[in-house]
Amino acid sequence: MVVFVSGYGQLLTEVTRLLPAGTGIPPVGNDPGEQARWLEHHPVPPGRHGAMLTDQPALWQPAQQAGWRVYWCSPDQPPMGTEPLPGKALAMTLGAFIRLFWDVDIADTRVVADVMTGHARRSGSILFVTSCTGGVGKSVTSRRLAERASRQVPTLLVDGNMLQSSQRSFFDPARTRTLRTIYEWRGGNPTRGANQGKTLHVPYDVCFAPPPGMTVTWDEYVEYVRAARRAWGFIIIDLDRVSAVDFTRPGTAAHDFLLPLSHEGAHILFIVKAGVQTQGDAVGLLSALPQTGIDPQQVGVKDTIPEGMRQADWKRIDWTRWATWLGVEFQSHEAGMRIAAGESGWNDPGLDRTREKVLDWALPGMGFDPDRVKEKAKGWKL
Ligand SMILES: Nc1ncnc2c1ncn2[C@@H]1O[C@H](COP(=O)(O)OP(=O)(O)O)[C@@H](O)[C@H]1O
Ligand SMILES: [Mg+2]
């Protein structure tokens, strides 16, 4: 497939900037009229594909008749002889878009439609927190990330674990309060499904999982998060564990919830607890991810070291083949006590640095700085 770029609106400026030198440049001049004539006189051979991405009005119709797809890449109405970008392309990350047209690997998780309309920052960022084994600290990590993130950006924590409702158990252990859940949300304003942080004594808002016995579909979760991205700058989703086969299995959270949103730029944090079995499971899962179309740039790994583990007993795995490695967190008896007591917001030198690193990765340029946080590695050398 041959694909040319002609124009300098928001989207095509970014595409041109990201493409390797020489790629996508039309064979003639800078004038769209001249380029359209060149396409007209060089019809696309039968069985081949050719496209022009443009935001410049010109006489594009003859080019179209010569077999070229002329995609209009600006928010205005497509003029004669051009067609709008398909909805599927608009919902892609810029990285996936460039891979589709040029088969070039670029890490850019902004959404095409947002870049095109100049609102690349307006849409909230999404971070899934998951693992392949239970009890690794997903729910605690989700809250701690939300707590720190909310100092820089309005943050929503979504409990995406319908079976356990861990966030409800933390904030309302006796289940005596009337709290909003995703079950109450019926489309429209996403704040209907969210509880304001101040009612829960935390600095971030929370959307709880449905009440016991009730469920919503993963499609509803997807729609909810899409709506929430317009209202919050950052959305953290506390997900249940996932397995490699889930990604090919409709009906699972991995296939129906995580996958569609990761194609729209969501980041995924995998927590791996040190220990041979759980690390092995994680290797199996992470090495299967590229087949699902998830960009390794969107995947991060954090190692959790159980209390009392010595460095000599830790088998360090090189995650960088499949993901960004974000560091190590040290569990402790003290942290465990605080969590059990329903506390939030404590300083923990074994946890805070890696939290800062995760946030700087998921929300680059937003003021997170791991180097500002001193790490207490308890005799470990990392
Ligand atoms: N930093 C920590 N130090 C000690 N215990 C922790 C820490 N983080 C989590 N835990 C404990 O580990 C257990 C599992 O945590 P949780 O967040 O519920 O895991 P998951 O959501 O992965 O099932 C909980 O009992 C929690 O209190
Ligand atoms: Mg949990």
Image (cartoon, rainbow, N blue to C red):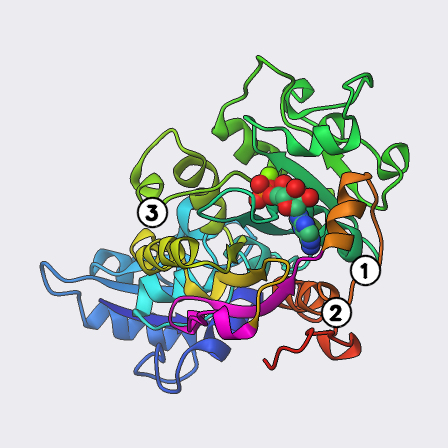
Is residue 50 among the parts visible in the rendering?
yes
277 left or right, relative to 367? left
Q: Earlier in the sequence, mark 2 or mark 1?
A: 1
Q: How many marks?
A: 3
Q: Amino acid at mark 1?
A: Gln
124 in relation to 156, above or below: below
**Cβ atoms at labels 3 and 2 below 8 Å apart:** no
237 in relation to 310, above or below: above
- Report the Cα–Cα distance between label 3 and label 2: 31 Å
**Cβ atoms at labels 2 and 1 below 8 Å apart:** yes
* Residue drawn at 47 percent across, 38 percent down: 257
**Disc 1 crowd, CA 10 A, few/some/many (<14, 14-19, 20+):** some
Query: Which label is found at residue 244?
Result: 3
Across and down, in percent, residue 74 comes to: 53, 58
Across and down, in percent, residue 295 comes to: 41, 61
Q: Earlier in the sequence, mark 1 or mark 3?
A: 1
* Residue drawn at 9 percent across, 60 percent down: 46
Which-is-in-front pick, marks 1 and 3? 3
Which one is in front, 323 or 189? 323
Quadrant of res 213: top right
Which one is in front, 316 or 159? 316
Tell me if the residue at label 2 has its CB under 8 Å from ligand 1: no
Q: Amino acid at mark 2?
A: Phe
Mark 2, residue position: 368
**Disc 2 crowd, CA 10 A, few/some/many (<14, 14-19, 20+):** many
The quarter of the rendering in which ligand 2 is drawn is top right
Query: Which label is found at residue 152?
Result: 1
* Residue drawn at 56 percent across, 49 percent down: 136
**Quarter containing the C terminus:** bottom right
Q: Mark 2 falls on what kind of element?
A: loop
- Report the Cα–Cα distance between label 1 and label 3: 34 Å
Which residue range is magenta in the image? 311-332
